[in-house]
Image (cartoon, rainbow, N blue to C red):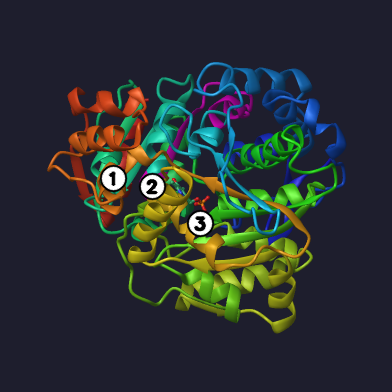
Amino acid sequence: MSLYHSTRSRALACSSKDAIRTGIAPDGGLFVCDALGGEKPDVSALASKDYAAIAREVLGMLLPDYTPDEIAACVDEAYANSFASPEVTPLVALEGAGEADGVGTYVLELFHGPTSAFKDVALQMLPRLMARTSSDSADESIMIVTATSGDTGKAALAGFADAPGCGITVFYPEGKVSHVQQLQMTTQAGKNVSVCGVRGNFDDAQSAVKRIFADQELACRLRKRGVALSSANSINVGRLVPQVVYYFAAYAQLLRAGAVKPGDEVEFCVPTGNFGDVLAGYYAKLLGLPVARLLVASDKNNVLYDFLTTGVYDRNRPFFTTTSPSMDILISSNLERMLYFLSDGDCDLVARLMGELAESGRYEISPDLLAGIQEVFGCGWADEKQVAEAIAACWQDHGYVMDPHTACGYHVLGQTPAAAGARARVLLSTASPYKFPRAVAEALGLRTPKDDFACMDVLAQATGTQPPAQLSCLADAPILHDSVVDIDRMEAFVERAAKKL
Ligand SMILES: *Cc1c(COP(=O)(O)O)cnc(C)c1O
């Protein structure tokens, strides 16, 4: 059977269920599976398959110890009723793009789930996958602990609220998420739910969460109470693999639209923070999807751009708070998995680089490894002004409104000539523009009233689009969570939350 092991060592191997249940490997590495790509979906048959059928096929290959019935049940529970589009992730053509060279540009809308961010695609699935794992002790509960830069938190809360056998604790950086994002989290109902602001930025909070996971004494105290910690961040395999599906679903829609023929290559451009979304695109490529190139789009926090162009990863730099908060990240956790696969599974190298990153905040890879990475990944970034200009230009040229994260990708697409051999370019749209109504209205030169919900109305009127109901109703929802703690009090908060389980 294909087993998962840490990116930093092959010493311990486990099933995909165990990898999902534990979240992160005991040595601090991320779970990977060497059999990835050994079995491939039939690309020429994609056109006749709907999202659920593609999901069953792809997830079955990536999570081999789940039975087909278990996978089918998870897919059905996650996607049958909770997405506003029958395609789940609909593909929209940008009218007029690519007329010169015949390479059309498409937007893959990933934001039609319950919280209007792409993270719903994975976080509607993860609790279902988690529920079908089991531990040796029958009545163990799992406490999901997650740091969020804005969108993961709400999507995880929506997925795990009142999920049997689970609790969820979310930490968000106080004052560094949008008003709508903050309300989405602080109004979350559910008996097993805890939400807390943190004085610090996302990287501080994420690093603290990693320390909480590594704290053996805490683990021991919680075990006595029947609680095990796990992660809903994209370091969890069960969070990562559902994202592979929509790359295939995008290709299926391109086939149906006649935009590509089976085997034609497609370029994907991905607004990137923690590197989970774009890594899923790389997994799709390893699974045989004809991917010409993956364009990694960053905002002003362009640590990935520097890494992908020079081979030096250096987080010792200023941190910028931008209009694309979910990409305001200096440590992209899933880069570790990419380094693993592109170094042909060199655990020692990965362990050494991650050790250097933890110690000095910096590491450098060999020119050979960099060249291999650059064959697959392109890159670019947008500053705040370019993001605003991209939102305005896309509206003007194509009558399409996008959010600031997606706009980073739109800017990078415009800057970068299409990859050789690409027959279509697909921009992944990671959030509804209505999650960031102020930034979008401002970019379009519209009025920006003090209240974000009034900005939604302005945006709706000017563009003839509709805010998703789950966002507009937040204006009247009661605040249920108002805790804010310092970084060094996060662990105590988790322990208190665990007592409620
Ligand atoms: C999380 C997020 C991203 C970044 O995705 P990663 O998988 O962390 O690279 C981009 N845009 C939005 C809106 C997000 O919520």
Q: Which residue is mark 1?
A: 492
Mark nearer the viewer, 2 or 1: 2
Q: Is residue 453 magenta?
A: no
Label disc, if present, on residue 148 of the rendered structure = 2
Residue type (three-letter) at the residue carrying disc 1 = Ala
The type of residue carrying mark 2 is: Thr
Residue positioned 47% across, 71% down in the render: 303
Between the C-alphas of marks 3 and 1, the distance is 39 Å
Which residue shows up at 83% across the image and 37% down it?
41
Element at label 1: helix
- What span is colored magenta in the figure? 126-150
**Disc 2/disc 3 C-alpha distance (Å):** 21 Å
Regarding residue 221, the answer to whether it shows in the image is no
Residue under numbered circle 3: 409
Q: Position of residue 250 (x, y in %)?
A: 67, 39
Confirm or reject: label 3 Cβ below 8 Å from ligand 1: no
State whether residue 479 is above or below residue 493: above
Residue 457 in the image: state x and y as whole percent.
23, 32
> What secondary structure is marked by label 3?
helix
Badge 2 or badge 1: first in the primary sequence = 2
Residue at left offset 33%, top offset 64%:
384
Nearer-the-camera pick, 157 or 113: 113
Distance from label 2 to label 1 (Cα)?
18 Å
